[in-house]
Image (cartoon, helix red, strand yellow):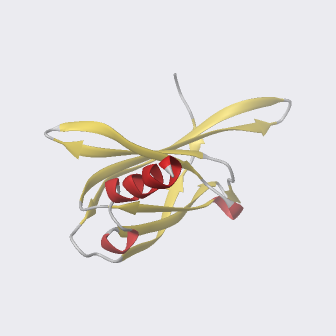
Amino acid sequence: MCCLLITFSLFGCHPSPRYLTLVSGKTVYGELALEETYIEVYRLEQSRWRYFSDTRSGYHGSFRIHLPPGTYNITASKTIRMGQGEVLVRGKLEDLKIEEKSGRIDQVVILMVPASGP
């Protein structure tokens, strides 16, 4: 019974996805779609970027994120094999603005490039 009560209270803490904007897209490096890319979402709050959520890209680099109105930066990173070694690649989508009742933002592409530093 306690587990059921906790489950219902958790559902009450998060907005229903139908009131959020669905952002869908993919992570790519050159012509290659990258699966299992780590994606972090940051929201602009009072002139500061704050961590909002994270996820991983799926099949053919696809991802889906439900976001409330606001301004967001989305970063992506993954280590890939290149030649005999591994390379960290990163990408960023900056200043994505979500308006009230936007519905959907489709075909977002996060272009990944080799990281130049930490």
67 over 115 or under it: above or below: below
Give the residue displayed 40% in from the left and 52% down from the top. 10
| Residue placed most toward the observer, 115 or 63 | 63
- The residue lying at 37 percent from left, 53 percent from top is 9
Image location (x, y in percent) of residue 45: 19, 42
Of all residues, the one furthest to the top in this rendering is: 118
Taking the spot 27% from the left edge, 38% from the top edge, the residue there is 49
- Return the x and y of residue 22 as percentages of the image width and height: 41, 69
In the figure, residue 19 lies in which quadrant? bottom left
Number of labels in the image equals 0
Q: Is residue 19 left or right of residue 91?
A: left
Residue extending farthest right: 84
On screen, residue 32 above or below 83: below
> Hey, which quadrant is residue 46 in on the image?
top left
Q: Is residue 41 left or right of residue 85?
A: left
Specify whether 9 is left or right of 71. Answer: right
Q: Is residue 97 above or below residue 47?
A: below
- Return the residue nearer the eye: 14 or 97: 14
Residue 106 placed where, x, y %? Answer: 45, 73
Q: Residue at x 43, y 53 (%)?
A: 5
Q: Is residue 46 left or right of residue 36?
A: left
In-front residue for pair 6/114: 6
Q: Going by the picture, which residue comes out furthest to the front?
A: 1
Q: Position of residue 21 (x, y in %)?
A: 35, 69
